[in-house]
Image (tube, rainbow, N blue to C red):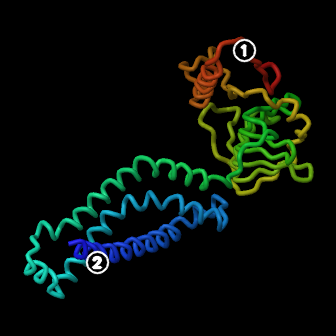
Amino acid sequence: MRLLDRYLLRELLVPLGYCLSGFLVFWLAFDLFSEMGQLQDQKLRGGDILQYYLARIPEFIVVVIPIALLLALLYTLTNHARHHELTAIRAAGVSVWRLCVPYLGVGLAGTFFLFALNEFCVPRTSERAERIFNRRLDRPKKSVAPSSGLANLREKRIWFFERYNPRTSEMLNPQVLWTLPIGSELWLLATRAVRINGIWTFYNAREFTATADTNSMLAPAIQTNVLVMPQFRETPEEIQTHLGLPFLGMVPALFDHAVGDPLINNGVPPNFVESFRAIRTNLLFSSSQPGGRTVAITSSALRS
C-alpha cells in the first residue's frame, strides 16, 4: 500500500504546487499594480519592494492554501476518474476509506500547518512588512522643532506652526493671524512655508478676512497654490528664539463695540467661541502631568 500512497500523494502535491505558484504570481502582479502609487509615495526602492512582498507571503499563504488544496484535489480526482484509476484501485480490493487516507492526511497536515503559520509566523512577518513599508518615510529629526508659535507685536502678527526646521527655514502647517492697519484681521493658512531669498513663500495657501464692522464668520479671500508674502519680515533668528514654547491658541479680536461683556454665550461670533474651547482643550492636555506651568498671554494690537 505504500506504493499506492506515494502515487496518490504525488498526483495531489504536483497540482497543489502549481495552484500555489499560480495564485502567488497572480496575487503579486495584482497587488503590485494596485499599490504602485502607495509604494512610490513611500519612496520604496526595488530591494525594499522585494523584501516587502517576501514578508507578506506567509499572510498570503494562509488565505490561499484552502482554495489551492480544493482545486488541486478536484483536479486530481478528475484525472483519476478520466483514466479509470479509481475503478482499478477499487477492483484491487482497496476500500474508499483507505483510498482517502492520503488525501485526509494532507488535509490534516495542512490544518496544523495553517494554525502554526497563522499563530506564530504571520504576526511577526506582518509587523516586519509594515516596518519595511514605512522605512523610507522622513522621520522627525532633532533639528526639527515641535509645535510652537511666534508673537510679533511690532507688526501685529501671530504665527503658529506645527514643525519648523531651522536649517532650511521651513514650516509645516503654518497659520498666521495678522491685524491690519485698518483694523480688520487676516488669517493665513497653508500646508508649508519656506523663506526663499529673504521672502516667506506659502504653499497651498488660503486667506480669510474678518472686517471691523462685523462679527460674522471668517470670509475666504484668496486660495492659491503659491503665495509670496514680502510683507512678512520675521527672520529665522526671531523664530528660533521662540522654539520650544508650546502655542495654546489664538483669540480673535471683537470689533463690535456693542458687545460689552464678551462671554462665549453672549452674542459673540462662532470663531470667538471656538477659539476659547480650543485653548481650554490644549490647557487640559498640557496639564496632564504634575508640576508647575507658566502661561504667557500676549496681544498683537494696542489697548487689547
The residue type indicated by label 2 comes to: Glu
**Disc 2 to disc 1: CB gap under 8 Å:** no
Horizontal arrangement in the rendering, residue 249 relative to residue 68 (left or right): right
Residue shown at the point (19%, 82%) measured from the top left: 80
Q: Residue furthest bottom?
A: 83
The residue type indicated by label 1 comes to: Arg
Residue shown at the point (68%, 37%) measured from the top left: 210
Q: Position of residue 227 (x, y in %)?
A: 77, 53
Of labels 2 and 1, earlier in sequence is 2
In depth, the one of 54 and 198 nearer the eye is 54
Whether residue 140 is visible here, answered yes or no, is: yes
Relative vertical location of residue 255 with respect to residue 217 in this rendering, above or below: above
Whether residue 72 is visible here, answered yes or no, is: no
Where, quadrant-wise, is the N terminus in this rendering? bottom left
Horizontal arrangement in the rendering, residue 127 relative to residue 185 (left or right): left
Q: Position of residue 301 (x, y in %)?
A: 80, 26
Q: Which residue is mark 2?
A: 11
The alpha-carbon separation of the residues under discs 2 and 1 comes to 76 Å
Rendered image quadrant of residue 235: top right
In depth, the one of 54 and 190 nearer the eye is 54
How would you rate the neighbour count of disc 2 (Cα within 10 Å): few for under 14, some for 14-19, many for 20 or more?
some
Q: Which residue is mark 1?
A: 293
Where, quadrant-wise, is the C terminus in this rendering? top right
Rendered image quadrant of residue 27: bottom left
Disc 1 is placed on an element classified as: loop
Residue shown at the point (72%, 34%) measured from the top left: 147
